[in-house]
Image: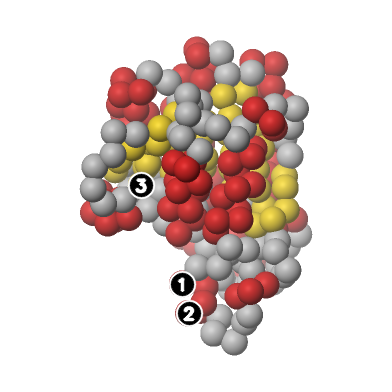
């Protein structure tokens, strides 16, 4: 798969999955717009200069800041061909009936609000350009409720439903919208949090990145509104 004539915007680009996805797209020749909340973390994740890489710091919870960042990207590269919505977050919680409003709002903001701000800014640009690809990150646990994970499961389930709705709305306009449903991703944080687990059964970020790459490619042009499990051996 070649992306040598494509521009790809990645949110949450400074994270473990963001770096893996950026590396996969860079190897395929894409120009990259790498968006995260903190400029220092972005520059630490992507040191040096690269004419095929634009680093943009913006709070994805701030719709106006996201609009400005996307506008800069379009001025710089001319268009955005693919949007990878990787930004999000996880929290265990109390039982649903004890879930405080701030926990509910935090997870909805992290997993749904950031996605909405990104697509509000990017989709009009894609429509004006005649098409594009959008890949969202849901979660395998969003397919059913889990104890002490009510708010998280609900927020990631909303990502799936929004993916399906967007696909239905945009498929006739040349925009494919799909999402991936990873199980546990093999990251340093997860290894620390689950020291007795076997990370060989988890999903390597690079493996998830290759699924995202495929969904952004022309080979996936017939796929609309899919939620693809990427579960490794877990």
Which residue was labeled with disc 3? Answer: 36
| Residue 182 image offset from top left, x and y in percent | 65, 57
Q: Is residue 180 left or right of residue 189?
A: right
The alpha-carbon separation of the residues under discs 1 and 2 comes to 6 Å
Tag shown at residue 49: none
Asked if the residues shown at circle 1 and circle 2 are in contact, with their CB atoms under 8 angstroms apart, the answer is yes
Which residue was labeled with disc 2? Answer: 192
| Residue 44 image offset from top left, x and y in percent | 27, 56
The alpha-carbon separation of the residues under discs 3 and 1 comes to 19 Å
Q: Nearer the viewer, residue 166 or 11?
A: 11
Residue at left 34%, top 34%?
Answer: 52
Tag shown at residue 188: 1
Residue at left 41%, top 48%?
Answer: 13
Q: Is residue 203 above or below residue 222?
A: below
Q: Nearer the viewer, residue 133 or 53?
A: 53
Q: Earlier in the sequence, mark 2 or mark 3?
A: 3
């Amino acid at each position: 798969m070649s992306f040598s004539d494509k521009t790809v915007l990645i949110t949450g680009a400074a994270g473990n999955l963001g770096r893996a996805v950026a590396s996969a797209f860079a190897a395929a020749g894409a120009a990259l717009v790498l968006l995260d909340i903190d400029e220092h973390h972005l520059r630490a994740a992507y040191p040096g200069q690269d004419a095929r890489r634009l680093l943009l710091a913006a709070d994805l919870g701030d719709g106006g800041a996201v609009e400005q960042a996307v506008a800069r990207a379009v001025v710089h590269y001319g268009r955005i061909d693919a949007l990878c919505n990787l930004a999000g977050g996880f929290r265990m919680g109390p039982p649903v009936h004890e879930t405080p409003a701030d926990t509910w709002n935090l997870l909805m903001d992290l997993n749904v609000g950031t996605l909405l701000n990104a697509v509000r800014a990017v989709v009009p640009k894609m429509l004006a350009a005649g098409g594009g690809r959008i890949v969202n990150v849901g979660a395998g646990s969003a397919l059913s409720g889990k104890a002490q994970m009510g708010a998280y499961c609900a927020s990631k389930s909303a990502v799936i439903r929004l993916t399906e709705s967007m696909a239905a709305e945009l498929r006739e306009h040349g925009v494919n919208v799909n999402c991936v449903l990873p199980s546990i991703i093999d990251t340093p944080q997860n290894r620390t949090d689950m020291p007795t687990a076997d990370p060989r059964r988890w999903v390597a970020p690079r493996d998830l990145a290759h699924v995202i790459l495929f969904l952004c490619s022309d080979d996936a042009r017939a796929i609309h509104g899919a939620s693809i499990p990427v579960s490794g051996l877990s």
